[in-house]
Structure formats: structure tokens, C-alpha cells
Image (tube, grey):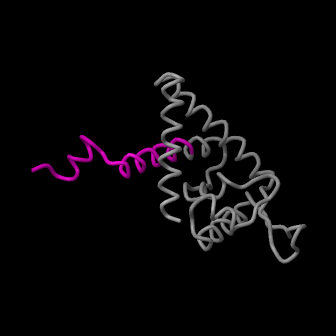
Amino acid sequence: MVSRAEQNERDPDLGVLAVRLLFGVQDELFSRLAAEGFDDLRPRHGAVMAYVDEAGVRATRLAELSGQHKQVVGKLVDELVVLGYLERRPDPADGRAKLIYPTERGLAEMRAGGRIMAALQARHARRLGKDVYGVFKAALMDITAHQRDRRS
């Protein structure tokens, strides 16, 4: 009889592959960000920093985009405000609501993160070939969207 560990080594299921990819990307991204001076960020902060926008965004929208609960996003935003990456400002369209904006430090991290992720993706595209990588990414996006839709 084959153990679960052996099974997931030989023929990992989609969940195992997704987790391995996530952790591998996070390890590379956050170690490279740390080397560029953003050593106070943690992988959990990526759920917000990946979706925050220069034009500002509501916390509820960050929760929708990231798939995280509003309370989790609120806690992450609180942490990122204290760390100096984000700030809250009144929403000009609705004075009762707040928008979350990146600070100068947040914008610098977003540029660095974008550059690092572009290099990571380019490396995989070279390894697989641009066309194969494009097909892979499109299929992964489709599977991810289909799986997220099932949650709703």
C-alpha cells in the first residue's frame, strides 16, 4: 500500500501542487524583497499588497479580490499601516467610508514586487518556452477562476 506522502510525491493532487507553487513563489518573492530593504513584510501581507492600488481601494474590495475574510484583510491593513506601507483616507465619493492607499514606501514595494514577479515569470517562460508557459498560465487562470466560482 502506498502512503499519502508517497502518493503526493509521485502524483500530487491539485491542492498539493497549488500549495507547493504558492510557498515556492512566496519564498522567492519575500526573500528578494527583504534583500531590497522590505524585510518587515511577511507572506500574509501579500493578500493585500497584491491588490492595493495607487488610486485607493476599499477594504471590502481587497477582501473580494484576495478571497480573504474582511476581518483578516482589516488586520493585515492595520499591520501594513503600522509598518508604513499603507494609509487610510476618507473616500471622496462617500465620506463615511475609507479608502486604502499605498504610501511612498508601499509604492516602492509594489514596484519591486512587480519587477521580481516579472523576472520569476520570465524565467519559467524561458524554461518551458513562451508558448507552453502561456498555455499553462491560461489553464491555471481558468482552473483558479472555476474553483473560486464554486465557492460563491
Determine if the magenta segment contains residue 62: no
The residue sitting at 65% across, 49% down in the picture is 38
Q: Residue furthest left?
A: 1
The residue sitting at 49% across, 52% down in the picture is 146
Q: Nearer the viewer, residue 41 or 114?
A: 114
To which quarter of the image does residue 33 belong? Answer: top right
The reply, left or right, for residue 37 in relation to residue 143 is right
Q: Residue furthest bottom?
A: 96
The reply, left or right, for residue 127 in relation to residue 63 is left
The x and y percentages for residue 29 are 56, 43
The x and y percentages for residue 88 are 79, 67
Q: Which residues are magenta?
A: 1-29
The x and y percentages for residue 106 are 74, 52
The reply, left or right, for residue 61 in relation to residue 125 is right
Secondary structure mostly taken by the magenta-highlighted segment of the chain: helix
Q: Nearer the viewer, residue 83 or 22?
A: 22
